[in-house]
Amino acid sequence: MDEANLLALLNRMNLWWGGEEVQESLKKAEHHRRDFYKIRERLMTSSRPIMTIRGPRQVGKTTLCGQLIESLLTEDHIPSDRILYLTIENSAILSNPEGVIEEAIETFKTNILQKDFRDVDGTVYIFIDEVQKTPNWADTLKYYTDTYSNLQFVATGSISTLIKSDAGDTLIGRMDERVMMPMKFIEYVRYESVIDEETVYDESTELRSKLEESVKEGDSAPLRGALSRFFGVYENKKPQLLRLKDEYLLKGGYPSVLNESVPNSYPVLDTDLRNTVTGDLANVFQVETPEKVLRVLSLLAASTGSKVSKSSIAEAADLSRQTVDAYLEHLDEFYLINRCPKYSGSEYSSGGLPKIYLQDVGVYNALNGTLAESTLENPEAMGPIFETAVCDHTRRLQFYLSNAQNADISYYDSGGEVDFVLDGNEYLIPIEVKNGDSTSQSLRGLKRFLEERNAEFGICVNNSDVLDNEDGIIHIPAWMYFFLC
């Protein structure tokens, strides 16, 4: 692209250069997710010149960029000519993305900044959205951060492995990685202002700290005490919290459905999913029949909570086993599924079929035809829906307990099943999921796990607002467990 056309395009992307506010199409919402505050703090304090933000499409990465830019302009009073935003998802750029990052930076430096970066007193911020869609982006960013010490890059991407593999060894020591996922339940609570923003996270932090204390001391008392206090304090908020929990179990955590009714959420989620699978995923991995990927995803949704045989999936989708393997990798890399292997208790042993869950419960409902308020009255349908949401939140709890090292969870199956197991250097927590009253149901697998593995206590998440403790098992209502995660 010639410099004049590129400059015109950049001016349309960076309206603040002309004294205007950050465009609504970029920042989209006044509401700030918790990720905004964490990433903003990291952006202002990190010694690393490149921050990558990975996550699914439509999760809010572009909005985050717009909100960060607005905060730099209005709160930190960064001069407008020291902020560049470039999205690779532009038809003019996508038609020829080779070298566009360097061309944009040089055009910005020459025409907007009008001086060399070395002559700028302060940091210059460069945001690049969907960075993986331009070749050799990591080499380009390495060159600029090696050459200039006052550049701070924020690069977003929707494909996990491409971002990580492209950066790889190239950006070691230069890159701060962040992952942005669909909203958790407590962000729903915060958005609806049922509990004020600061209190929401204070309560979540307190519950987590008491869980850690219970694990460390080998005594569930600190966690049980915190849960009892929380249950009592928010008794008057419970009708609203239960309503939001039910809404979350149907619509899921994508920001695009926040303000949509349950019926209107379906076309939004369905369209986004089809665009992701038949568009981005198919193009990136050169899938000739993307409809088959959707078929595999639908089969996975239909088998939620059950062990998944790749051979059975291959037969049902009329695909080879190798192709199913490849499609599962693609779906994983686009943050659409969560894999849950069988728990072995040893890194040296493995075996057994995995369970595979859809990452977001709203997408699950869109695929399964259960995105309707009437589903809440159908216990058979609610079982896998509830388990899908608990899986997602449990992975986030694992990420927290492992000090952001991993979000891997497993299931246990030996003389009775346990839905999820959190395993770390200093903790082992089995978690069972029951859509009804968990105190009146068989927990044989959970009890067997506690006996055989010497875990200090187990957790049973229920969808019936039951808080109880018996035989080393803490029964936690779903809305409280989601706060804990």
Image (tube, rainbow, N blue to C red):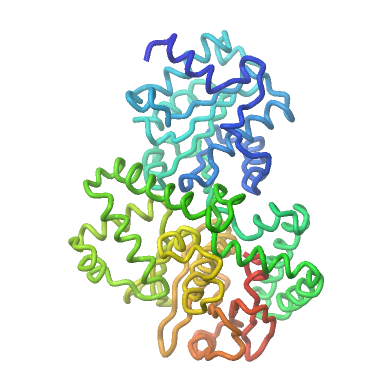
From this viewpoint, is residue 219 visible?
no
**In the figure, 448 relative to 430: above or below?**
below
In this view, the residue in front, 290 or 107, is: 290
For the C terminus, give its image quadrant.
Answer: bottom right
In this view, the residue in front, 330 or 290, is: 290
From this viewpoint, is residue 247 visible?
yes
The image quadrant that residue 19 belongs to is: top right
For the N terminus, give its image quadrant.
Answer: top left
Which residue is located at x 40 percent, y 45 percent?
Answer: 159
Give the side of residue 133 with respect to residue 71, left or right.
left
How far across and how far down the image is residue 342, in percent?
39, 75
Which residue is located at x 42 percent, y 55 percent?
Answer: 336
Which residue is located at x 71 percent, y 70 percent?
Answer: 210
**In the figure, 395 relative to 180: above or below?**
below
How far across and how far down the image is residue 64, in percent?
59, 39
**In the figure, 387 relative to 67: above or below?**
below
Which residue is located at x 32 percent, y 46 percent?
Answer: 278
How far across and how far down the image is residue 205, in percent?
71, 61
Give the side of residue 37 with respect to residue 98, left or right.
right
How far across and how far down the image is residue 218, in percent?
65, 80
Task: Give the mark count.
Answer: 0
In this view, the residue in front, 379 or 215, is: 379
